[in-house]
Amino acid sequence: MDSNNEMDPAHQVPDGVDEKTVRALGALSKALETTERARGHLYGFHQLTGTADFELDDAVKLLREAGHEEQAGRVEREIVGRNVIPGHWTFQIIEAYNSTYYQPFSALERDIVDEVAGGRDHLLEARLKEIRRTHDHPDHTATPPS
């Protein structure tokens, strides 16, 4: 295949798949990508909260060294290791999100792409690439070099 001429078969719209279906699959994919970003923010929240919890150890130590035993004890007792919502640390929120929302959404998106497009991903994006690239330009090839 000449990498400058046409998309690889995995990114070509299968016979019988109409434009509305391609757009619908693109919208579904975009929604899943947004969910991926939300999930990433959730992992960021998890890591930042955990980091803050460990940073409290330094605050407790310094408060004690400065002679503020009561305040150090309050931080240690009230905040260190505290649930972020009732009964949950951040890892439990992630686990619930993954099993309740992310995994079912991801599996459903995969099923629909398999059912209506023969498993071909990113058909809308591939079409946009074909429309927007400059043909015969070495940096605008349809596919990677073989």
Image (cartoon, rainbow, N blue to C red):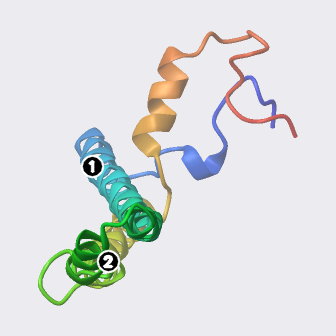
Residue 5, placed above or below residue 145: above
Please give the name of the residue rendered at 36% of the width and 66% of the height, measured from the top-left corner: 67
Label 1 secondary element: helix
* Other-residue count near label 1 (Cα within 10 Å), few / some / many at <14 / 14–19 / ≥20: some
Q: Locate the N terminus and report the quarter of the image it occupies.
A: top right
**Residue at image x 60%, y 52%?**
10
Question: Above or below — where is 91 with respect to 32?
Answer: below
The image position of residue 91, as x and y in percent, is 36, 80
Type of amino acid at the residue the image marks with label 2: Val
| Lower sequence index among marks 1 and 2 | 1
- In the visual, does 79 lie left or right of 44? left
Secondary structure category for the residue under label 2: loop
Could you tell me which residue is drawn at 30 percent across and 67 percent down?
68
In the picture of the structure, the residue carrying the numbered disc 2 is 80
Q: Tell me which corner region of the image, top left, top right, bottom left or bottom right, holds residue 5.
A: top right
Question: Residue 142 appears in which quarter of the rendering?
Answer: top right
According to the picture, the residue beneath numbered tag 1 turns out to be 21
Q: In the depicted view, which residue is nearer to us: 7 or 36?
A: 36
Q: Is residue 97 left or right of residue 117?
A: left
**1 and 2 marks in contact (CB < 8 Å):** no
Q: Residue at x 45, y 66 (%)?
A: 65
Does 72 appear above or below 124?
below
For the C terminus, the image quarter is top right
| Residue in the foreground of this view, choosing between 103 and 68 | 68
Distance Cα–Cα, label 1 vs label 2? 51 Å
Q: Amino acid at mark 1?
A: Thr
Pinpoint residue 113: horizontal percent, then vertical percent. 38, 63
